[in-house]
Image: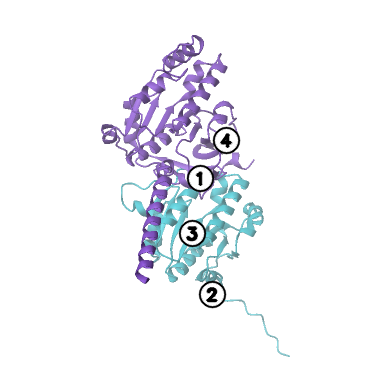
Chain colours: A cyan, B purple
Amino acid sequence: MVVRSKKKPGPKSKKSKLDSDFKILSSGSPVLLVLTSGDNQDKSLERVLKTLESLKAHGVFITTTKSSSKLTKEFKKRGLDTSRLIFIDFVKKPEGHKDMNRRIYVNSLSNLTELSIAISQALDTLKEKPKFLILHSIPTLHLYNKPEVLARFLNFIISKLREWNVKGVFFSLATPQEGEFTERTKEFYDKIIKVKKHRKGEG
Amino acid sequence: MCWKNLLLVSFILFFSTVSMKKKQNKSESTGILNKAFLGVPGLSKLFEGNIKKNVSFLISGGSGCGKTIFCLQIVYNAAKLGHKCLYISLEESPEKLVSYMHVFGWSPEELIKKGLFKIVRINPFEVAKSIERSYHELVRDKYMPGLKHIQKLLESDPTVEIVVIDSISVVEAIFLSKKELYRLHLQQLFEFFEKNNIALFVVSESEASPLEYVARGVEEFLADIVVLLYNVRQGDIRTSAIEVFKARGIKHLKKIIPMHIESGKGITIFPRLKVFGEEFTR
């Protein structure tokens, strides 16, 4: 009798699972929810951006925790093409006239109306196709807005993305605190991708 | 015979083209407001179809909601298109209003020189006195009771097509204990402009929030179109919004819509978008 031990999936196959999850972005205008734990957020974000870059897509990046200038530097270090991005920044108003047309500043995380206007204006500015929108991240917006208000906002924006034929990727955390909100709003998305905890050695 | 038929067809075609062009010109002349609205990005999307030339508007909202800027933006655009506009201010001076226009990148000086845009300031107490006198003392002159101040202004230029009165609340405040007289005056005012084929914009103060707005009755009833401007509080910030509360005989968008007021730009309306906030989830 031959006992075959169950092979644990190696780092390479985990990486390809994530890539295959994001492959859904290659056609149509799907809207994804990516659930990460704290330590694998950056890697997941990088994967998403690289996938969209490979599709020659241009898009809008909504950043709620880091300034757009800091993110631009980080992305460039990782070899990402930031010329395809328009940032919506809550963190820091861009100074001077440098790159003003690639950055829109919204004065408050509780100003979802202003955010929806900024999204609409940013997407209108992009003439290239395909287009995408990345929201990083929902938990930060949750700190400043009541769940029902945020849910209405997400529902509205996602319906607009579908109407405008724009791919959407929304980032959230796979935590108990966010779990209830995710459960309530899971129907909004075409797919929910849970990114497992990052292990050492994984790509 | 063939060439006679050809000649007949050509005549028919020629005259039908001429009459089509005449019809087109007639409908164009009734679309002044539709064209003027193009000066406020997004505003024309709130209404469907042609808005009559002699329609009356009530522009209502709280302090700082953008009522004056809204009216200035519309009449500035109308004047640029060659339509004569008269802005009657009962509060701000003409110089102050022109300085507001500069903030938004508008230069009305040339239009004022050409006589297409006129800003006058009248004393609301004088207006109130004149109204009382004409109704109570039955002063017999060529002017309609309570409208002497308006008619005198229009006498100097009878070709005015759009008039703004900013704001009627000042006059209402004076007539607080004589509401019947104020109502009578308003009725006369609206009727006068409708009969004289002039578009009227009346500005009035109301609540800044949609949840607190209560239709007061007189102005909302008399005006053909009621537009409400809001300045809604959301946490530590305020959001501007607009709503077409009523539009007699005109199909219109029935929702509260976000609005921007920006230096160098003026008002921009976003009819495709929504206002988000706790007030709107109740």
Distance from the alpha carbon under mark 3 to that under mark 4: 31 Å
On residue B210, the disc is 4
What residue is shown at x 50% (from left), y 50% (from top)? A116
Distance from the alpha carbon under mark 2 to that under mark 3: 23 Å
Q: Residues within 10 Å of mark 1 (few under 14, many from 20)?
A: some
What element does badge 2 sit on?
helix
Question: Which quarter of the image is occupied by the N terminus of chain A?
Answer: bottom right
Which residue has dot 3 on it? A133
Q: Nearer the viewer, mark 1 or mark 2?
A: 1
Q: Residues within 10 Å of mark 2 (few under 14, many from 20)?
A: few
What amino acid type is highlighted by mark number 2?
Ser
Residue A54: x, y in percent? 44, 71
What element does badge 3 sit on?
strand
Q: Earlier in the sequence, mark 2 or mark 3?
A: 2
Q: Chain of mark 1?
A: B
Query: From this viewpoint, is residue B76 visible?
Result: yes
On residue A16, the disc is 2
CB within 8 Å, label 4 to label 1: no
Which residue has dot 1 on it? B47
What element does badge 4 sit on?
loop
Instruction: Name the residue at the bottom extreme.
Output: A1
What amino acid type is highlighted by mark number 3?
Leu
Q: Nearer the viewer, mark 3 or mark 1?
A: 1
Image side of residue A21 versus residue B200, left or right: right
Badge count: 4
Q: Quadrant of residue B6?
A: bottom left
Query: From this viewpoint, is residue A71 visible?
Result: no
B13 relative to B135, above or below:
below
